Image (spheres, rainbow, N blue to C red):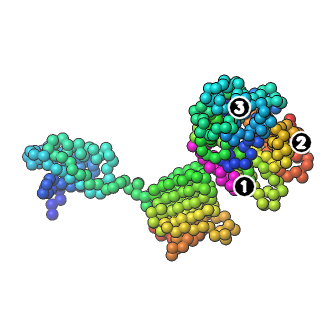
Amino acid sequence: MTVKPNHVTIKGIKDGLVFLLDDKCELGTLLEELRYKLEHSHQNILTGPIIHVDVKLGTRIVSDDQKESILDILRQKGNLLIRSVEMPDSEPAADPLKSLTTMCGIVRSGQVLHHEGNLMFLGDVNPGGTIACTGDIFILGSLRGMAHAGLEGNEEAVIAASYLAPTQLRIAEVISRPPDEWENRETSMEFAFLSDGKMQIDKISNILRMRPDFIAFKGV
Amino acid sequence: MGEAIVVTSGKGGVGKTTTSANIGTALALLGKKVCLVDTDIGLRNLDVVMGLENRIIYDLIDVAEGRCRLNQALVKDKRFDELYMLPAAQTKDKHAVTAEQVKDIILELKKDHEYVIIDCPAGIEQGFKNAIAGADQAIVVTTPEHAAVRDADRIIGLLESSHISSPKLIVNRIRANMVKSGDMLEIEDILQVLNIDLIGIVPDDESVIKAANSGEPTVMNPDSRAAIAYRNIARRILGDTVPLMLLDQKKGMFTRFKKFFGMG
């Protein structure tokens, strides 16, 4: 097997060309090689009638500017018509299951805080106010209103609050009214989760039992 | 240029009009030039509480629609030379006037008066929007009940998303004995939910009802605890530091001291 720095593969398909761009090398190297291939080594093939081009970036994450710089090189060849660009949907930071957004303020009566992903909220959610997330909800403050975690059906989602005294809790499709016995609990930070489709409450330090995917601190 | 303060609550019947009348009168008592504006069009009653109903010739709608000049519509108070009231119309409804028109009127009033107190109608619709349009500051009135606190919270949210940034809170109609027995919400609990600055607490006092019916604001009666509370609020609006009234009347020395202070 020959190992040579070939980061740009050009393939011919029925109705055009596919540019397979390596997703591991540096972007600069890639651009350089692409430019070289278009202007020198493959010049002959790439002149002539209009050809449809599909660009495949693999798993490389590019910003809009970077994407443009790649396409600009292709556009320099008048006969290359870019038909599609295949790249990962979004940047990893926007991966709703992994990231945690921090917001602060007060969600007052009649107000709705809607968030895609996991949310850390610094402040209170008042009675009549709603906080709704597709992921987990962590409230550093009092939850007196309604909280809905796992909006789109994620039953693994949890709701945690420094002071958990909600009017209603929802996780995925499960709705729970706080039972009366909640009122006389010791005031430690708690979280709500679903266990066998039923809403349960536990101390925040036990959250790892429910969510083994969290990064655990184990000490030395 | 004066300052326009809107008195609002969301819920009806918590004492917006009484509070407006008393704060306005208390400010006049302290020598300020004050104008009270009733924006509760169709359900005016600030004039009744002030005892000025029979002096009304023109109203806010007449001014807005140009049937009279602003000065012609102002009703001068019978007790103070520097206290005026702009009454609402009783025959129209809230849609008879736009927020822009009210804003212009308030702006005009601020030129001649040190304080313009705007009495807001209950609700969060057009009437509320009209009332807050010209205001620089807001006072939210609530009573120690869950329903009133819930509505106050909604109003604060709406105020905060408008041009009025930090509304102040008045907790009205507190009954010390009920708070003590745990039947009434405590002020601490209310503050924890609403999380805004408290500008005064007003004890429940029968003299308020009596005063409202006789068209004489409570604040004129120095024997009433509510009157002292309103006077304290007026002084806090002027920027004085006045300690909160103690609800427990048994602390006689303290109360007397407070009373003395409040009347100062």
Of pointers 1 and 2, the one earlier in the residue sequence: 1
Q: Amino acid at mark 2?
A: Asp
Residue A203 horizontal side relative to residue A80, left or right:
right
Segment tinted magenta in the rendering:
B146-161
Judging by the rendered image, the residue that carries numbered circle 2 is B223
The foreground one among B74 and B92 is B92
**Looking at the picture, how far across and down is residue B13, in whole percent?**
72, 48
Label 3: element kind: strand
Label 2: element kind: loop
Determine the CA span between mark 1 and mark 3.
31 Å
Q: Amino acid at mark 1?
A: Glu
Classify residue B109 by image quadrant: top right
Q: Amino acid at mark 3?
A: Leu
Labelled disc at residue B86: 3
Residue B132 horizontal side relative to residue B79, left or right:
left
> Which chain contains the residue that carries disc 1?
B
